[in-house]
Amino acid sequence: MSDKQLPTPDMKRGPRAFFKDLQREVRMITWPTPQETTRLTGTVLGVCVLVVVLLFGLSLAIEQLFRLIGVGR
């Protein structure tokens, strides 16, 4: 492990310090642009559709295999 360690929160500092630290962390967030959001949403939806199609195809293949060997109905 490196010499630098992550600071551990000091629970004795109280809620005021917690919210001050929280506010500082929120300022460091870099939010995506609308174009990035649209592109990433499209990517997620595309991957979801791909997984659904693959699982459906796998389900059909397994069903046919079971019918060939006489398992089930």
Image (cartoon, rainbow, N blue to C red):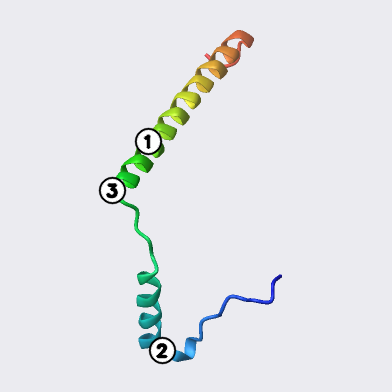
Residue 30 in the image: state x and y as whole percent. 37, 61
Residue identified by numbered label 1: 45
**Mark 1 and mark 3 residues within 8 Å of each other at the beta carbon:** no
**10 Å neighbourhood of mark 3: few (<14), some, or many (≥20)?**
few
Up-down: is 63 above or below 5?
above
Q: Residue furthest right?
A: 1
- Of the residues shown, which amino acid type is indicated by label 3? Pro
Q: Which mark is residue 34?
A: 3
Up-down: is 62 above or below 24?
above
Residue at position x 55%, y 80% in the image = 8
Is residue 37 shown left or right of residue 50? left
64 or 44: nearer the viewer: 44
Residue 60 in the image: state x and y as whole percent. 50, 17
**10 Å neighbourhood of mark 2: few (<14), some, or many (≥20)?**
few
- Element on which disc 2 rests: loop
- Element on which disc 3 rests: helix
Residue identified by numbered label 2: 14
Residue at position x 49%, y 26% in the image = 55
Residue 12 in the image: state x and y as whole percent. 48, 91
